[in-house]
C-alpha cells in the first residue's frame, strides 16, 4: 500500500493515477475540509480529465484521511515555498511530513519526496532530522526523490506520458520505486542519485524561466522604441535554429515563478543570468500596470473602475491562481495607494478580490478598457463582444482594430 502525503495539485492526481492503475492507495492531508470533500465524492480543483480519473480511483478503492498510514511506501507531495528575502527553499512542510512518517512507519519503509526542492535539500534538511530521531538511512528508512513533471491544464495526460526521474541512495531501491511509477507512467523512467534528481527538476524550470524572460525583455525593448515585438519574434523564428517564446504579463504557478529562485538563493554569486531573468519576469505585472495607466491617459479614462482585468488564474483554462500575474498586479496597484480595477475570471467562482465579477457580459457592460491577462478559451470565443471597447491584449489573441499590445 502507498500512502500519498499531501493532496494538492500534484499529490491528488498522483494518488488517483496510481489507484486507477491497480495500486492500493491511501491519500493523507492535514486539511480535514479537503479530505471531507474528497470522501463526499467531489474533487477539490478543476482539471481536464480529473473527475473521470477520480471516479476510476474511487471504484478501485482509494481512501482519503487525515491520518498517516502504517505501510512500506510513502510519497510526500507537499508545498515547497521559498523565502522571498533569501530566495532559498523553505523545506518546513517536507520536514514535517517526514517527521510524521517516522511516527508510524515500519522498519525499511521507503519515503519518496515528490515535492520540488533545490539541490542538497535532502542532505541539509531531511537526512539530519531522520538521524536526530534515531533512524538509520538505508536500513530503517530509504530515501528517494521523484520530482513531479506535470502542468495544470494537462495533468492527466502528462502523468501518463511524461518521462520521470527517480533519485535514490540505493540503485536497488530506485528500481523498486521505478516499478511503482511504471504502473501508470508510459514515458521513460531514469534512475539516478538524489542530488542529480533534485538539480534536474530545478534546471528544467529554470531553462523555461530564462527563455520567457528573454521574450519579456524583448517586449520592453520594443515598447521603448515603438516596434512590434510579435512581428519581430515571428520573423526571427523563421530561422531554423531560433525559437523565441511569446512575451506575457508575468509568470505564475508554483514552478517557473518559484523554482529558479532556489538556485539564486543557493548560488547567489554564480546564478547571475537566472537572477536577472527572474527579476525581468517578476517585473512584468508592474510593466503592464504602467501600460494600463498610459492607455487610460491616452483615452481620457480617469476612473480605474472603468478598467477591467480579464483573468485571475496564472494560465489559461485552469482554476490555479498561485503566483498569478493578475494578483501581483493588483498587489502592486495597492502599493501605489490606488484601487478600483474590476476583475473577472470564468474559472474562479469564489470572491477572492474586491470588485470581482462572475458574469462576462456584466463585466464588459461596466468597463471601457478591457485588459486581457489570461487567454482562456472563453475570451477567445467571445472576442466579438469586445467591439466598441478599448482593448489592451497582453496575450496577443485579439486582432480588433486599435488593440493595444505589450
Image (cartoon, helix red, strand yellow):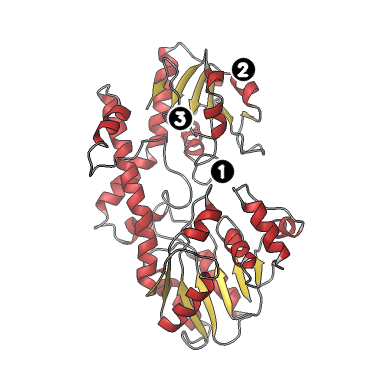
Quarter holding the C terminus is top left
C-alpha distance separating marks 1 and 2 = 25 Å
Q: Is residue 170 visible?
A: no
Residue 72 falls left or right of residue 220: right
In the rendered image, the residue lying farthest to the top is: 300
At x 36% / y 56%, what residue is drawn? 204
C-alpha distance separating marks 3 and 1 = 29 Å
The answer to which of 225 and 135 lies nearer the viewer is: 225
Q: Measuring from the top left, give residue 323's x and y in whole percent.
A: 49, 45
At x 37% / y 75%, what residue is drawn? 193
Q: Which mark is residue 365?
A: 2
The answer to which of 98 and 203 lies nearer the viewer is: 203
At x 48% / y 74%, what residue is drawn? 178
- Image: 113 above or below 291: below
Query: In the rendered image, which quarter is residue 358 located in?
Result: top right
Say which residue label 1 marks.
318
| Front label number (2 vs 3) | 2
The answer to which of 406 and 305 lies nearer the viewer is: 406
- Image: 396 above or below 159: above
Amino acid at each position: 500500500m502507498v500512502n500519498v502525503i499531501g493532496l494538492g495539485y500534484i499529490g491528488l492526481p498522483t494518488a488517483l493515477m496510481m489507484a486507477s492503475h491497480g495500486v492500493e492507495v491511501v491519500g493523507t492531508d492535514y486539511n480535514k475540509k479537503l479530505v471531507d470533500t474528497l470522501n463526499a465524492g467531489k474533487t477539490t480543483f478543476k482539471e481536464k480529465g480529473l473527475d473521470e480519473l477520480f471516479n476510476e480511483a474511487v471504484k478501485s478503492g482509494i481512501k482519503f484521511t487525515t491520518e498517516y498510514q502504517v505501510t512500506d511506501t510513502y510519497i510526500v507531495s507537499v508545498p515547497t515555498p521559498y523565502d522571498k528575502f533569501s530566495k532559498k527553499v523553505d523545506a518546513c512542510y517536507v520536514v514535517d511530513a517526514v517527521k510524521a512518517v517516522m511516527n508510524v512507519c515500519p522498519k525499511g519503509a521507503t519515503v519518496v519526496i515528490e515535492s520540488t526542492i533545490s539541490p542538497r535539500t535532502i542532505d541539509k534538511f531531511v537526512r539530519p532530522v531522520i538521524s536526530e530521531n534515531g533512524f538509520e538511512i538505508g536500513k530503517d528508512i530509504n530515501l528517494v526523490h521523484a520530482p513531479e513533471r506535470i502542468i495544470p491544464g494537462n495533468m492527466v495526460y502528462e502523468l501518463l506520458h511524461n518521462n520521470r526521474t527517480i533519485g535514490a541512495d540505493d540503485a536497488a531501491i530506485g528500481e523498486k520505486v521505478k516499478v511503482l511509477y511504471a504502473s501508470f507512467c508510459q514515458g521513460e523512467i531514469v534512475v539516478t542519485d538524489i542530488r542529480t534528481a533534485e538539480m534536474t527538476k530545478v534546471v528544467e524550470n529554470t531553462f523555461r524561466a530564462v527563455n520567457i524572460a528573454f521574450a519579456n525583455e524583448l517586449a520592453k525593448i520594443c515598447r521603448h522604441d515603438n516596434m512590434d515585438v510579435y512581428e519581430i519574434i515571428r520573423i526571427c523564428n523563421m530561422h531554423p535554429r531560433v525559437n523565441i517564446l511569446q512575451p506575457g504579463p508575468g509568470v505564475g504557478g508554483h514552478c517557473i515563478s518559484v523554482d529558479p529562485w532556489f538556485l539564486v538563493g543557493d548560488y547567489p554569486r554564480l546564478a547571475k543570468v537566472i537572477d536577472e531573468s527572474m527579476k525581468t519576469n517578476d517585473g512584468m505585472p508592474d510593466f503592464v500596470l504602467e501600460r494600463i495607466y498610459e492607455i487610460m491617459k491616452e483615452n481620457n479614462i480617469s476612473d480605474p473602475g472603468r478598467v477591467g482585468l480579464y483573468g485571475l488564474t496564472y494560465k489559461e483554462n485552469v482554476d490555479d491562481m498561485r503566483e498569478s500575474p493578475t494578483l501581483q498586479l493588483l498587489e502592486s496597484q495597492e502599493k501605489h495607494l490606488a484601487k478600483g480595477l474590476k476583475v473577472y475570471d470564468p474559472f474562479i467562482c469564489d470572491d477572492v478580490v474586491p470588485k470581482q465579477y462572475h458574469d462576462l457580459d456584466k463585466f464588459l457592460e461596466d468597463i471601457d478598457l478591457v485588459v486581457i491577462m489570461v487567454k482562456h478559451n472563453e475570451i477567445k470565443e467571445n472576442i466579438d463582444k469586445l467591439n466598441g471597447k478599448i482593448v489592451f491584449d497582453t496575450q496577443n489573441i485579439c486582432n480588433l482594430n486599435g488593440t493595444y499590445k505589450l
